[in-house]
Image (spheres, rainbow, N blue to C red):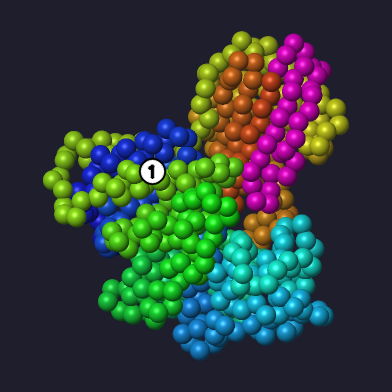
Amino acid sequence: MKFASPESVGISSAHITKFINKLNQREMHMHSLLIARGDTIVHEGYWAPFNKDLPHRMYSVTKSFVSVAIGLCEEDGLLSLDDKIVDYFPDKLDGNVNEHLYRQTIREMLTMTTTCCPCGWFEETDPDRTHLYFNKEGYRRPSGTIWEYDSAGSQVLSSLVERLTGKTLFDYLNERIFTHLGTFKNAKILKTPNGDSWGDSAMICTTRDLYSFARFVMDLGVCDGKRLMNESYLKEATKKQVDNRWGFHMSAFHHGYGYQIWIGEENSFAFVGMGDQLAVCIPKYDLIFCCTADNQGNESARDYIAYQLWDTIIDNLSPIPLSENSEEKEKLSTLTSSLKLFAIQGSTDSPWREKINGKTYVCPENEMNLSDFTISFENQRSGTLTYTKDGNKMELPFYINENRFGPFPELGYARDKGRVRTTDGHKYNSAVSATWENNKLLVFVQIIDEYFGNASLSFAFNEDRATVLFTKTAEDFLWGYEGQCEAKLK
């Protein structure tokens, strides 16, 4: 990989500094960002403890990897995009196939103009998601008509790649592309319960890995002058194939949809994952922006990041190199080296700290199965929430206005296979911060592992009582961290 100053490619260090400051000021929960122009990385930054070598869950960015794998299968003569998907999975069909699904093609699945079965799988007992897709009731309309996000369809396409190639999705892409890029050396894709690759959500790789793949796609299949893939598929995959608006309020990546790839303004395209894993490619300016984050629960975050990218960076690009500005470069360097994972901010203390310190509150029956809790403070800066939930005593240490890193106390969450609970004592890594708001202690939990999620725990005190309010945003864990109840001083 090549590296140079922003100014050498027509980007001002001052504008990158402004961009990062805007993200921080609006409390975007960022983990990394990378900006490249041409074949040169001109800036990358990581919010500690994240770093350039730490693989990160990319969520639905994985769908764009599946798209490229489908294109390779087409190039190898293993399929045609206008083939019916059911023809490849006769063994997965239990009975009469829904007439709309019977006609559904691979191309329609790539553009998400499918019959769109409501196929959420985390609550299902069927471990085979492809079997579930073909046999679950609920297909609502003819395929090829309306765009609607169909995550389960992407999983089926991933299974199709594995069936046709006899390789895992990762191994197939690694053999054909990744090894030539020189990246993805510590990457992997998690599995579904039956052992298929989790092709719609579970690529785990570094930000630099993601950038190298985005560069390959924007270069239409060429790496270091060597063609690795026919350009015709990638040209079609990265341009608008269908309208993907629901309603008529435009958002950053609803300018159309290609083949498992989102279209943005100025004919840009993007790989997009939950929580704001992004690779934004802008061929007009030969610029790529990548980032990782966990903004789950913040619906406006993705648009904010994209619009700030345009307003602050893209709209100020120069077609020629800029003069090097040592002062601005130093400011950017200082800011980048000081980046830290978001921690909730507010008052550092409250009179209620001494009133509640070490005292136990008892909860009546509630939806969270929370029996009691005690909040103990080691000092003004740090404390520990001890609580009984589902009959288990747990401890959650925190810092005030700063993250305290450690294992989240819950056991039995999924690890290498989605939905499959562990029994080996595995706990997710977490960052926990807290702050005071008058009589209220707010505790913010961030899961920062191969799965990401967050939970907000609020404790509001009044005389000998307290109101407890838990909310969470996570894909398939932090169960029981949603709800509210009254608690009484023991």
In this picture, residue 416 sits left or right of residue 12: right
Considering depth in this image, is 342 or 102 the residue closer to the camera? 102
Considering depth in this image, is 362 or 153 the residue closer to the camera? 153
Q: Which residue is drawn at 49% across and 50% down?
A: 251
Q: Quadrant of residue 331?
A: top left
The answer to whether 191 is drawn above or below residue 422 in the figure is below
**Three-letter residue code for mark 1:** Gln
At which x and y percent is residue 116? 67, 66
At which x and y percent is residue 474? 64, 47
Q: Which residue is drawn at 49% across and 56% down?
A: 254
The magenta region covers 461-490
Q: Name the residue under label 1.
A: 308
Quarter of the image where the C terminus is located: top right
Considering depth in this image, is 120 or 187 the residue closer to the camera? 120
Q: In which quarter of the image is residue 339?
A: top left
Q: Does the magenta stretch include residue 464?
A: yes
Q: Is residue 205 visible?
A: no
**Numbered disc 1: secondary structure:** helix
